[in-house]
Image (cartoon, rainbow, N blue to C red):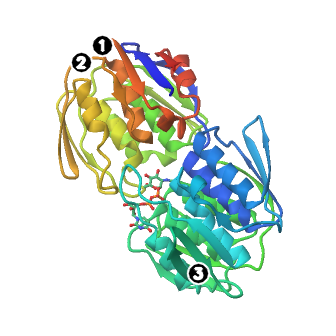
Amino acid sequence: MDKLLIAGGQRLSGDVRISGSKNAALPLLAASLLTEERVVLTNIPQLHDITTMVQLLGRLGADILIDERCSVEVKAGTQITALAPYELVKKMRASILVLGPLVARFGEARVSLPGGCAIGSRPVDQHIRGLQAMGADVQVENGYVHARVTGRLQGARIMFEMPTVGGTENLLMAACLADGETVLENAAREPEIVDLALLLKRMGALIEGAGTDCIRVQGMKSLHGCQHRVVADRIETGSYLVAAAMTRGDITCRDTRPDLLDAVLLKLKDAGAEITTGEDWIRLRMEDRPQAVSFRTQPYPAFPTDMQAQFMALNAVAQGTGTIIETIFENRFMHVQELNRLGAQIAVDGHTAVVTGVPTLQAAPVMATDLRASMSLVLAALVAEGETLVDRIYHIDRGYECVEEKLRQLGARIRRVQ
Ligand code: UD1
């Protein structure tokens, strides 16, 4: 199993190119099932989760062409088998995103239940209830969600109990081929949903309000093919900026979107970073030891849960005490124990973590437990005294493209070992 060996103490500097967003690319790939024509997606990051989604589309019967310049072409003709098997779905929860497009286009789909995951139980009840409101008969049997509809799905008014990113994406895609108007209320507002709506509009869909909490869709009989470039990864961007802030560095993230990172940039400024931005770049300079920051994770545009672990690492070496409240997932503090093994002082009480900054961390063997948690350990290792071995980094390979190459290019001493 691959591990990362990191020698701490290097100040990061230079430029880093930000990849296309994993969380945008996954629903975009699923959306290609909505048409029999060719959908070409560019700026697709090379990541394990993307491979899983591409494998799933292939298993469903789609023709796929991948070129070495990060573009994927999908043609989901008429030979689709609407069955997403457990062995692929269990690898990645986002596989559930094929459910909406499959039922909407083929009238029936069987998709394995994704089950729990390390950061919480994460049910899909909102996805199911939405499809039921659109007239689908949905049964959960033998670990599979089996959805059927006679004729087309019917447009409906759907009120989410909580803003769910995946739920909004699944029903947005389904609504595009439904009969009549669908209104999604209390919808999630994440930039990945806006990117999905952009693709769907290019495919001929009529959508208003993506990026707000009320999305209106006029269903069409069919959609057509198109080409679309995946939006930049705001979480990858934020992670490298935190790395620069922690190492008192000076880096510029290129090919990114500063406008999608308001809440994160605000907290980095509170921590003492000097930030300048252009249309597609962000430069961060940090002279002194960071100041601890406090925040609560919330749906977009507030502070993202996917940046919580990285800021926990920053607070661990900051001046002062920061309080972090996680409101999205019930079990997303698994990195705390590992950070404490490196000498951090973090106390958890329910959904709240209180981090008392220490002047230095010390290297130790640590283990990644989920995707963003693993990045927090890499960040801590970058400033720890000595060589830290981060185990189980297959988690990081799910979501960070070429992580060690990018960090090495910025001056980190990092290498992959078996
Ligand atoms: C997506 C992101 C993930 C991010 C999360 C929150 C992808 C591939 N993943 O995950 O990186 O951390 O958004 O920003 O884009 N919930 C229910 N019932 C449902 C659906 C969700 O109770 O039917 C709950 C979840 O358990 C969770 C909360 O709603 O507590 C938010 O989950 P959701 O927004 O759906 O997250 P994902 O789409 O799975």
Residue 360: image tag? 2
Pointer 3 residue:
182
Label 1 crowd bin: few (<14), some (14–19), many (20+), radius 10 Å? some
Quadrant location of ligand 1?
bottom left
Q: Mark 2 near ligand 1 (CB under 8 Å)?
A: no
Q: Is residue 409 visible?
A: yes
Q: Residue at x 60, y 37 (%)?
A: 19
Q: Amino acid at mark 2?
A: Thr
Cα separation between marks 1 and 3: 56 Å
Horizontal and vertical percent position of residue 212: 49, 67
Label 2 crowd bin: few (<14), some (14–19), many (20+), radius 10 Å? some
First in sequence: mark 1 vs mark 3: 3
Dot 2 falls on a residue whose secondary structure is loop
Residue 385: image tag? 1
Q: Residue at x 42, y 55 (%)?
A: 301
Dot 1 falls on a residue whose secondary structure is loop
| Residues at circles 1 and 2 in contact by the CB criterion of under 8 Å | yes
Q: Amino acid at mark 3?
A: Thr
Q: Which is more toward the observer, 26 or 63?
A: 63
Say whether residue 162 is left or right of residue 42: left
Residue at the extreme front:
142
Horizontal and vertical percent position of residue 288: 29, 20
Q: Is residue 287 visible?
A: no
Seen in the picture, residue 231 relative to 17 is either above or below; the reply is below
Cα separation between marks 1 and 2: 7 Å
Horizontal and vertical percent position of residue 302: 37, 54
